[in-house]
Amino acid sequence: MYHWIAKLTESKQRLGAVRRLIGLLPDRFICFLGWFVGWILYLKAKPLGIHVALNMAEILDSRGQREISRCCRKYFCQFPTILLEVILAPQILKKDKVGQWIIEGEEFLKEALNLGRGAIVFAPHMGNFFYYYWYLSQRYPCLTVATGGSSELRPLYLLFQEMGCQGMDYDNTPPLELLKTLTGHLKNNGVVFLLGDFWRPSFPTAQFFGKPSRSPGGAAALALGHKVPVVPLYGWREKGGRHHLVFEAPIHLYKNFEVNQREAATNLLNVFIEQAIRKVPEQWFYWFNLHERWEPEREQNQTGGAGVA
Protein backbone atom coordinates (compact mmCIF):
# COMPACT_ATOMS: atom_id res chain seq x y z
CA MET A 1 0.00 0.00 0.00
CA TYR A 2 2.72 2.47 0.95
CA HIS A 3 4.45 2.33 -2.43
CA TRP A 4 1.18 3.40 -4.08
CA ILE A 5 0.98 6.37 -1.74
CA ALA A 6 4.57 7.23 -2.62
CA LYS A 7 3.70 7.45 -6.32
CA LEU A 8 1.59 10.50 -5.47
CA THR A 9 3.50 12.06 -2.58
CA GLU A 10 7.20 11.60 -3.48
CA SER A 11 7.04 14.57 -5.87
CA LYS A 12 5.64 17.85 -4.58
CA GLN A 13 5.06 19.00 -8.14
CA ARG A 14 3.14 15.85 -9.03
CA LEU A 15 1.05 16.11 -5.89
CA GLY A 16 0.20 19.71 -6.70
CA ALA A 17 -0.68 18.86 -10.30
CA VAL A 18 -2.99 16.04 -9.21
CA ARG A 19 -4.67 18.36 -6.70
CA ARG A 20 -5.29 21.02 -9.32
CA LEU A 21 -6.56 18.54 -11.90
CA ILE A 22 -8.90 16.57 -9.66
CA GLY A 23 -10.02 19.74 -7.90
CA LEU A 24 -11.78 20.74 -11.10
CA LEU A 25 -14.14 17.77 -10.79
CA PRO A 26 -17.50 17.96 -8.99
CA ASP A 27 -17.54 16.20 -5.61
CA ARG A 28 -19.68 13.32 -6.86
CA PHE A 29 -17.06 12.48 -9.50
CA ILE A 30 -14.30 12.43 -6.91
CA CYS A 31 -16.02 9.54 -5.09
CA PHE A 32 -16.66 7.82 -8.43
CA LEU A 33 -13.00 8.22 -9.41
CA GLY A 34 -11.86 6.72 -6.10
CA TRP A 35 -14.05 3.66 -6.59
CA PHE A 36 -13.00 3.31 -10.25
CA VAL A 37 -9.29 3.37 -9.35
CA GLY A 38 -9.99 0.94 -6.50
CA TRP A 39 -11.56 -1.59 -8.87
CA ILE A 40 -8.50 -1.41 -11.11
CA LEU A 41 -6.23 -2.00 -8.11
CA TYR A 42 -8.38 -4.92 -6.99
CA LEU A 43 -8.17 -6.57 -10.42
CA LYS A 44 -4.43 -5.99 -10.90
CA ALA A 45 -3.01 -6.49 -7.38
CA LYS A 46 -3.94 -10.16 -7.04
CA PRO A 47 -1.25 -11.17 -4.48
CA LEU A 48 -2.23 -8.28 -2.21
CA GLY A 49 -5.90 -9.10 -2.69
CA ILE A 50 -5.24 -12.66 -1.55
CA HIS A 51 -3.51 -11.40 1.64
CA VAL A 52 -6.39 -9.03 2.38
CA ALA A 53 -9.04 -11.71 1.80
CA LEU A 54 -7.20 -14.24 3.98
CA ASN A 55 -6.77 -11.71 6.78
CA MET A 56 -10.45 -10.81 6.60
CA ALA A 57 -11.51 -14.44 6.59
CA GLU A 58 -9.40 -15.12 9.70
CA ILE A 59 -10.92 -12.23 11.69
CA LEU A 60 -14.43 -12.09 10.21
CA ASP A 61 -14.92 -15.84 10.54
CA SER A 62 -18.70 -15.55 10.96
CA ARG A 63 -19.08 -14.20 7.43
CA GLY A 64 -19.31 -16.33 4.32
CA GLN A 65 -16.91 -16.33 1.39
CA ARG A 66 -19.18 -14.10 -0.70
CA GLU A 67 -19.34 -11.50 2.07
CA ILE A 68 -15.55 -11.60 2.49
CA SER A 69 -15.08 -11.05 -1.24
CA ARG A 70 -17.45 -8.09 -1.14
CA CYS A 71 -15.57 -6.56 1.82
CA CYS A 72 -12.27 -7.07 0.02
CA ARG A 73 -13.49 -5.26 -3.12
CA LYS A 74 -14.87 -2.39 -1.06
CA TYR A 75 -11.60 -2.15 0.85
CA PHE A 76 -9.64 -1.59 -2.35
CA CYS A 77 -12.12 1.13 -3.34
CA GLN A 78 -11.87 2.92 0.01
CA PHE A 79 -8.10 3.29 -0.20
CA PRO A 80 -7.84 5.61 -3.24
CA THR A 81 -10.92 7.50 -2.03
CA ILE A 82 -9.09 8.38 1.21
CA LEU A 83 -6.08 9.56 -0.79
CA LEU A 84 -8.20 11.77 -3.01
CA GLU A 85 -10.01 13.24 0.00
CA VAL A 86 -6.72 13.99 1.76
CA ILE A 87 -5.14 15.57 -1.32
CA LEU A 88 -8.20 17.80 -1.77
CA ALA A 89 -8.71 18.48 1.95
CA PRO A 90 -8.06 22.26 1.76
CA GLN A 91 -10.91 22.52 -0.75
CA ILE A 92 -13.34 19.89 0.54
CA LEU A 93 -13.15 20.76 4.23
CA LYS A 94 -14.13 24.36 3.59
CA LYS A 95 -17.36 23.38 1.90
CA ASP A 96 -20.82 23.18 3.40
CA LYS A 97 -20.80 19.39 3.06
CA VAL A 98 -18.82 19.15 6.32
CA GLY A 99 -21.96 20.39 8.04
CA GLN A 100 -23.75 17.34 6.67
CA TRP A 101 -21.54 14.89 8.55
CA ILE A 102 -23.34 12.74 11.09
CA ILE A 103 -21.84 13.16 14.56
CA GLU A 104 -22.98 10.91 17.41
CA GLY A 105 -22.00 11.08 21.06
CA GLU A 106 -19.79 14.18 21.05
CA GLU A 107 -21.30 14.99 24.43
CA PHE A 108 -19.14 12.14 25.81
CA LEU A 109 -16.01 14.11 24.95
CA LYS A 110 -17.41 17.23 26.59
CA GLU A 111 -18.31 15.15 29.64
CA ALA A 112 -14.74 13.90 29.88
CA LEU A 113 -13.30 17.41 29.56
CA ASN A 114 -15.54 18.62 32.37
CA LEU A 115 -13.30 16.67 34.75
CA GLY A 116 -10.51 19.13 33.98
CA ARG A 117 -7.83 16.51 33.31
CA GLY A 118 -7.96 16.57 29.53
CA ALA A 119 -9.13 13.68 27.36
CA ILE A 120 -7.56 11.06 25.14
CA VAL A 121 -9.57 10.45 21.97
CA PHE A 122 -8.66 6.89 20.99
CA ALA A 123 -9.39 5.78 17.44
CA PRO A 124 -8.52 3.16 14.80
CA HIS A 125 -7.43 3.93 11.23
CA MET A 126 -10.98 3.77 9.88
CA GLY A 127 -12.83 5.95 7.41
CA ASN A 128 -10.79 9.10 6.85
CA PHE A 129 -8.90 9.47 10.12
CA PHE A 130 -7.15 12.59 8.81
CA TYR A 131 -10.54 14.29 8.52
CA TYR A 132 -11.61 13.22 12.00
CA TYR A 133 -8.57 14.84 13.58
CA TRP A 134 -9.25 17.99 11.57
CA TYR A 135 -12.81 17.97 12.91
CA LEU A 136 -11.55 17.77 16.50
CA SER A 137 -8.93 20.46 15.88
CA GLN A 138 -11.63 22.93 14.80
CA ARG A 139 -13.45 22.53 18.13
CA TYR A 140 -10.88 21.73 20.81
CA PRO A 141 -7.21 22.36 21.64
CA CYS A 142 -5.81 19.19 20.05
CA LEU A 143 -2.50 17.45 19.74
CA THR A 144 -1.70 14.14 18.06
CA VAL A 145 1.29 11.88 17.52
CA ALA A 146 2.24 11.10 13.92
CA THR A 147 4.80 8.72 12.43
CA GLY A 148 7.00 11.25 10.66
CA GLY A 149 9.49 8.54 9.73
CA SER A 150 7.20 7.39 6.91
CA SER A 151 8.36 9.36 3.86
CA GLU A 152 5.18 8.36 2.00
CA LEU A 153 2.80 9.74 4.61
CA ARG A 154 4.82 12.75 5.73
CA PRO A 155 3.59 15.12 2.95
CA LEU A 156 0.00 14.29 3.93
CA TYR A 157 0.68 15.05 7.60
CA LEU A 158 2.34 18.35 6.64
CA LEU A 159 -0.70 19.28 4.57
CA PHE A 160 -2.94 18.91 7.61
CA GLN A 161 -0.43 20.71 9.80
CA GLU A 162 -0.79 23.69 7.47
CA MET A 163 -4.53 23.49 8.09
CA GLY A 164 -4.04 23.88 11.85
CA CYS A 165 -3.82 20.22 12.92
CA GLN A 166 -0.91 20.10 15.34
CA GLY A 167 1.08 16.91 15.88
CA MET A 168 4.30 15.53 17.30
CA ASP A 169 6.69 13.36 15.36
CA TYR A 170 6.95 9.97 17.07
CA ASP A 171 10.06 8.98 15.12
CA ASN A 172 12.10 12.13 15.68
CA THR A 173 11.03 13.32 19.14
CA PRO A 174 12.85 11.95 22.22
CA PRO A 175 10.43 9.80 24.26
CA LEU A 176 10.75 11.91 27.42
CA GLU A 177 10.07 15.11 25.48
CA LEU A 178 7.08 13.48 23.81
CA LEU A 179 5.65 12.34 27.14
CA LYS A 180 6.28 15.71 28.79
CA THR A 181 4.54 17.61 26.00
CA LEU A 182 1.50 15.32 25.93
CA THR A 183 1.23 15.39 29.73
CA GLY A 184 1.40 19.18 29.79
CA HIS A 185 -1.27 19.41 27.09
CA LEU A 186 -3.60 17.16 29.08
CA LYS A 187 -2.99 19.14 32.28
CA ASN A 188 -4.21 22.20 30.39
CA ASN A 189 -7.42 20.24 29.69
CA GLY A 190 -6.49 19.62 26.08
CA VAL A 191 -7.43 16.74 23.80
CA VAL A 192 -4.84 14.19 22.67
CA PHE A 193 -5.84 12.22 19.57
CA LEU A 194 -4.18 8.80 19.44
CA LEU A 195 -4.61 6.14 16.75
CA GLY A 196 -4.33 2.92 18.72
CA ASP A 197 -3.88 0.35 15.95
CA PHE A 198 -0.35 1.18 14.83
CA TRP A 199 1.99 -1.79 14.92
CA ARG A 200 5.74 -2.01 15.31
CA PRO A 201 7.82 -4.94 16.56
CA SER A 202 9.26 -2.68 19.27
CA PHE A 203 5.86 -1.91 20.83
CA PRO A 204 4.81 -3.56 24.11
CA THR A 205 3.08 -6.93 23.96
CA ALA A 206 -0.71 -6.99 23.79
CA GLN A 207 -3.66 -9.04 22.60
CA PHE A 208 -5.28 -8.12 19.30
CA PHE A 209 -8.23 -10.11 17.99
CA GLY A 210 -7.38 -12.74 20.59
CA LYS A 211 -3.82 -13.22 19.28
CA PRO A 212 -0.48 -12.19 20.78
CA SER A 213 0.67 -9.03 19.07
CA ARG A 214 2.13 -5.63 19.90
CA SER A 215 0.32 -2.32 20.41
CA PRO A 216 1.34 1.24 21.29
CA GLY A 217 1.11 1.68 25.05
CA GLY A 218 0.94 5.48 25.16
CA ALA A 219 -2.80 5.80 25.68
CA ALA A 220 -2.81 3.40 28.62
CA ALA A 221 0.31 4.97 30.15
CA LEU A 222 -1.12 8.50 30.01
CA ALA A 223 -4.57 7.43 31.17
CA LEU A 224 -3.29 5.44 34.14
CA GLY A 225 -0.48 7.79 35.12
CA HIS A 226 -2.58 10.97 35.13
CA LYS A 227 -6.15 9.67 35.58
CA VAL A 228 -7.20 10.85 32.13
CA PRO A 229 -10.46 9.56 30.61
CA VAL A 230 -10.24 7.81 27.24
CA VAL A 231 -13.01 8.62 24.75
CA PRO A 232 -13.27 5.99 21.96
CA LEU A 233 -13.98 7.31 18.46
CA TYR A 234 -14.51 5.61 15.13
CA GLY A 235 -15.94 6.72 11.83
CA TRP A 236 -16.76 5.66 8.31
CA ARG A 237 -17.63 7.15 4.96
CA GLU A 238 -21.20 6.82 3.74
CA LYS A 239 -22.46 7.09 0.17
CA GLY A 240 -21.94 10.48 -1.34
CA GLY A 241 -18.80 11.16 0.70
CA ARG A 242 -20.59 12.02 3.95
CA HIS A 243 -18.73 10.96 7.10
CA HIS A 244 -20.30 9.39 10.17
CA LEU A 245 -18.41 9.82 13.47
CA VAL A 246 -19.31 8.00 16.68
CA PHE A 247 -17.91 8.98 20.08
CA GLU A 248 -18.44 6.42 22.84
CA ALA A 249 -18.70 6.80 26.62
CA PRO A 250 -15.43 7.63 28.40
CA ILE A 251 -13.34 4.72 29.66
CA HIS A 252 -11.79 5.43 33.06
CA LEU A 253 -8.92 2.94 33.02
CA TYR A 254 -7.50 4.26 36.30
CA LYS A 255 -10.59 2.99 38.15
CA ASN A 256 -9.94 -0.62 37.16
CA PHE A 257 -6.19 -0.93 36.63
CA GLU A 258 -3.04 -0.01 38.53
CA VAL A 259 -0.30 2.06 36.91
CA ASN A 260 1.79 -1.09 36.34
CA GLN A 261 -1.05 -2.87 34.50
CA ARG A 262 -0.61 -1.10 31.17
CA GLU A 263 -0.77 -4.28 29.12
CA ALA A 264 -4.13 -5.26 30.58
CA ALA A 265 -5.42 -1.72 30.04
CA THR A 266 -4.17 -1.73 26.43
CA ASN A 267 -5.92 -5.05 25.83
CA LEU A 268 -9.19 -3.48 26.98
CA LEU A 269 -8.73 -0.57 24.57
CA ASN A 270 -7.95 -3.04 21.79
CA VAL A 271 -11.36 -4.65 22.35
CA PHE A 272 -12.95 -1.35 21.30
CA ILE A 273 -10.80 -1.27 18.14
CA GLU A 274 -11.78 -4.84 17.30
CA GLN A 275 -15.48 -4.07 17.71
CA ALA A 276 -15.24 -0.96 15.55
CA ILE A 277 -13.43 -2.84 12.78
CA ARG A 278 -16.03 -5.61 12.75
CA LYS A 279 -18.81 -3.03 12.35
CA VAL A 280 -17.35 -1.50 9.15
CA PRO A 281 -14.54 -3.89 8.16
CA GLU A 282 -14.03 -2.62 4.61
CA GLN A 283 -12.97 0.80 5.92
CA TRP A 284 -10.11 -0.32 8.19
CA PHE A 285 -6.74 0.59 6.68
CA TYR A 286 -4.47 -2.22 7.90
CA TRP A 287 -5.96 -5.35 6.35
CA PHE A 288 -3.05 -5.40 3.89
CA ASN A 289 -0.46 -6.25 6.57
CA LEU A 290 -2.46 -7.69 9.47
CA HIS A 291 -0.76 -11.08 9.03
CA GLU A 292 2.59 -9.48 9.91
CA ARG A 293 1.41 -8.48 13.39
CA TRP A 294 1.14 -11.86 15.06
CA GLU A 295 3.91 -12.81 17.43
CA PRO A 296 5.86 -16.00 16.56
CA GLU A 297 4.60 -19.11 18.36
CA ARG A 298 7.91 -19.63 20.14
CA GLU A 299 7.74 -16.13 21.70
CA GLN A 300 4.16 -16.69 22.76
CA ASN A 301 5.24 -19.84 24.59
CA GLN A 302 8.13 -18.07 26.29
CA THR A 303 6.05 -15.16 27.57
CA GLY A 304 2.83 -17.02 28.11
CA GLY A 305 1.07 -14.02 26.59
CA ALA A 306 1.54 -12.15 29.86
CA GLY A 307 3.84 -9.52 31.29
CA VAL A 308 3.74 -5.83 32.04
CA ALA A 309 4.88 -3.32 29.40
Image (cartoon, grey):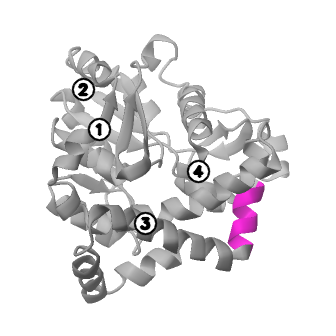
Q: Which residue is mark 3?
A: 32
Magenta residues, dominant SS class: helix
Q: Indicate which label's residue lies in the foreground, 4 or 2.
A: 4
- Where does residue 113 sit, x and y in percent of width and height? 23, 21
- For numbered disc 3, what is the local secondary structure? helix
Q: Of callouts 3 and 4, which one flags the residue occurring earlier in the amino acid sequence?
A: 3
> Which amino acid is tagged 2?
Gly
* Distance in Å between CA atoms under marks 3 and 1: 34 Å
Q: Of callouts 3 and 1, which one flags the residue occurring earlier in the amino acid sequence?
A: 3
Q: Of callouts 4 and 2, which one flags the residue occurring earlier in the amino acid sequence?
A: 2
Dot 3, how many residues are within 10 Å of its Cα: few (below 14), some (14-19), or many (20+)? Answer: some
* Distance in Å between CA atoms under marks 2 and 3: 40 Å
Q: Of callouts 1 and 4, which one flags the residue occurring earlier in the amino acid sequence?
A: 1
- For numbered disc 2, what is the local secondary structure? loop
> Which amino acid is tagged 1?
Val
The residue segment tinted magenta is 47-54
The answer to which quarter of the image holds residue 7 is bottom left
Q: Indicate which label's residue lies in the foreground, 1 or 4.
A: 4
In the visual, does 195 lie left or right of 308? left
Q: Which residue is mark 2?
A: 118
Dot 4, how many residues are within 10 Å of its Cα: few (below 14), some (14-19), or many (20+)? Answer: many
Give me the residue at 35% from left, 67% from top.
Answer: 29
Q: Nearer the viewer, residue 97 or 126?
A: 97
- For numbered disc 4, what is the local secondary structure? helix
Disc number at residue 282? 4
* Distance in Å between CA atoms under marks 1 and 2: 8 Å
Q: Of callouts 2 and 3, which one flags the residue occurring earlier in the amino acid sequence?
A: 3
